[in-house]
Image (spheres, rainbow, N blue to C red):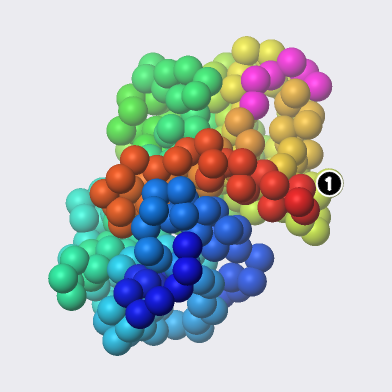
Amino acid sequence: MGIDAKTQLFGVFGNPVTHSLGPAMHNAAFRALGVNAVYLAFGLDEAKGAALAMRHLNMGGASVTIPHKTEVMAHLDEVNDTARKIGAVNTLVNRDGRLVGYNTDAEGAMRALETRGTIAGKKVALIGAGGAARAVGYGIVQRGGSLVIANRSEEKGRALARDLSAGFTSLDDLDLGGVDILINATSVGMVPRIDAMPVSVEGLTSRTLVMDIVYNPLETALLAAARAKGCPTVDGTAMFVFQAVAQCELWTGQTAPVELMRRTVLEALNGE
């Protein structure tokens, strides 16, 4: 599709964003859906700039990534209930000049996990206490999982556990033997430190589902070690794609082309 005077502008706001796979994925989705729109990456140092850009350029919508997911909330006209409870926004929608914030990270993570089974009644160990962990943890609780937060910083970990009415354990004391689902919601294992793991997999049993939100590399050291023990795994592209699917549907009102979006991300990661 060509760009013309009626092309609607979308994008991702964050810092850094030069590595983002969002433009490739969302532009492929727009083309497939026949939507006259383009999605670009915008590096911003402050969250206020995202809202100003949306308003001045009459953008249709945007993704918000690190480090602006919390701060941008103060500059919006409305924040939906889920995003407010999580305390972070990753999606902006321009509704006739009113900027509305949503969080699709939680739903994206849950849809990724549910490709492998149900969450209700499962004991879930979540590593991390940052914004991503908060969204994933919220989704686990909403789906009826029994959640335990494991974090290196006790203060941050206990704070998140308190907010989510979950349990807390230090990483050193985490017992993986009784865990049904293990999720890494930190950046440990991401390029360039691809050999790092957030926790030892020594206590894992083959029945434990292991998910890593890191998607570069595609198979992290944690997932490789878990797979070697016979564990089912979910890689970071699943959450990344499903949260983007929810964004696309908010922006267009159409059913997003999930498989195309997934294939586009995998091709980009493989350098194709």
Q: Quadrant of residue 220?
A: top right
Q: Residue 90 at what x, y percent from top left?
A: 39, 59
In the rendered view, would you say 8 is above or below 138? below
Determine the residue positioned at 72% across, 33% down: 223
Q: Is residue 238 visible?
A: yes
Label 1 Cα neighbours within 10 Å, binned few <14 / some 14-19 / many ≥20? few
Q: Nearer the viewer, residue 71 or 41?
A: 41
Q: Is residue 230 magenta?
A: yes
Q: Is residue 130 visible?
A: no
Q: Residue 125 at what x, y percent from top left?
A: 53, 31
Residue pushed farthest right? 195
In the rendered view, would you say 144 is above or below 63? above
Q: Residue 187 at what x, y percent from top left?
A: 65, 53
Magenta-colored span: 228-233
Q: Amino acid at mark 1?
A: Asp
Determine the residue positioned at 37% across, 46% down: 246
Q: How many marks?
A: 1
In the rendered view, would you say 72 is above or below 222? below
Q: Nearer the viewer, residue 204 or 89?
A: 89
Q: Residue 268 at what x, y percent from top left?
A: 69, 52
In the rendered view, would you say 36 is above or below 125? below
Mark 1: secondary structure: loop
Q: Main secondary structure of the magenta part?
A: loop
Q: Nearer the viewer, residue 269 or 233?
A: 269
Q: Is residue 25 magenta?
A: no
Residue indicated by mark 1: 195
Determine the residue positioned at 54% across, 25% down: 181
Determine the residue positioned at 53% across, 72% down: 41
Residue 120 shown left or right of residue 190 in the figure: left
Q: Nearer the viewer, residue 103 or 226?
A: 103
